Amino acid sequence: MAETRRDFIYRLAKGAGWSAALLGLLDGTVHALPKSEDTDLAILDASLALEHEAIAIYETALQRNLFVPGLRAYAVEFVGDHKGHRDTQIGLAEERGARSAAALSDYHLGGMRSGDAALRRCLEVEIAAQRAYQAVNSQIRAKDYLLTSAFILVDEVRHETVWKRVLGVKIY
Amino acid sequence: MSDYASADDALGAIEGFEADVDRYLLRLHRTVPAARAMIESFRRDRERHRTHRVRVRRRLGLGASATAAASEAREAPLDLVREAQSTLVYAHAEALPTLDDSVSVGLLLGDMVDLARQLTVIDLWIEAEAARG
């Protein structure tokens, strides 16, 4: 049976090391988490995991020269956004005295060898990031982090929308 | 942190900015037939957003909105449409910390996602116009 989008986002988040509670928010089995510093830190960690994965995908695709010239500028812009999101969230974790999640050593990108494969992988991670941020943001307690995370979500929507348009996926 | 002193203040600002965008959309809908399907989709989102804000106001014990229906703008250059839409998107983000209610935050976040998608569509439209010269 084909994997549904919901299953795919769940798999990506699980692979990125999301906790059971946050995965529950994604699959609808958990509706609310306690508003606490611990919840904020868990969300920060989970968000960072997705940012690391997005950066790895874009950097690998750029190094392999998989984007056609008209799309390369978008990829450069978007990886820059993801690096900004990563650094901002590392800063937020450090302000709270926490150590942030490190990037994995391998994101299994060996098979990403064509422009089409790169675009589809980029779209997948952007959809996952957008859905994930949207699912968890309402559980954030700290107002500064909530605002920052909302700004990040706006960027993720832009990335997702651009790749959908490029791949001919319906937007509206 | 946020430019808004209260949820009521933030929701009132969103409603004002939404009316600004709607004035441009009315103009574009009448003058750019090729954009009608897109604008009608945007309007359907708007209707849902208004319903959400009614629900948010009710949850937070706030009074109803007094924003009047928008009248058509005299012109609608895309750079100004984009600026108005961007203001509306970020007003949603800045409203979130004033709400102190997870359900309300969830509702406005969803609306912000719709609006950010619309903003990107406007960006792509501007890029396409520029590419055509």
Image (cartoon, rainbow, N blue to C red):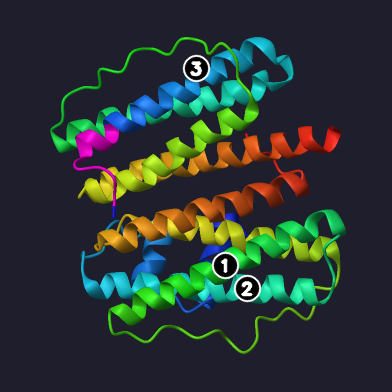
SS category of the residue bearing label 1: helix
Q: Position of residue A76 (x, y in %)?
A: 71, 64
Pick the residue in front: A76 or A54. Answer: A76
Q: Amino acid at mark 2?
A: Ile
CB-based contact (under 8 Å), mark 2 and mark 1: yes
Residue topped by disc 3: B23
Which of the 4 image quadrants contains residue A35?
bottom left
Rounded to the nearest angstrom, the CA distance separating label 2 from label 1 is 6 Å
Residue B63 in the figure: left or right of residue B128: left
Pick the residue in front: B52 or B97. Answer: B97
Q: Amino acid at mark 1?
A: His
CB-based contact (under 8 Å), mark 2 and mark 3: no
Do dots 2 and 1 share one subunit? yes
Q: Residues within 10 Å of mark 3 (few under 14, many from 20)?
A: some
Quadrant location of the N terminus of chain A in the rendered image: bottom right
The disc placed on residue A55 is 2
Residue B58 in the figure: left or right of residue B114: left
Residue topped by disc 1: A82
Give the extent of the magenta segment.
Answer: B2-11
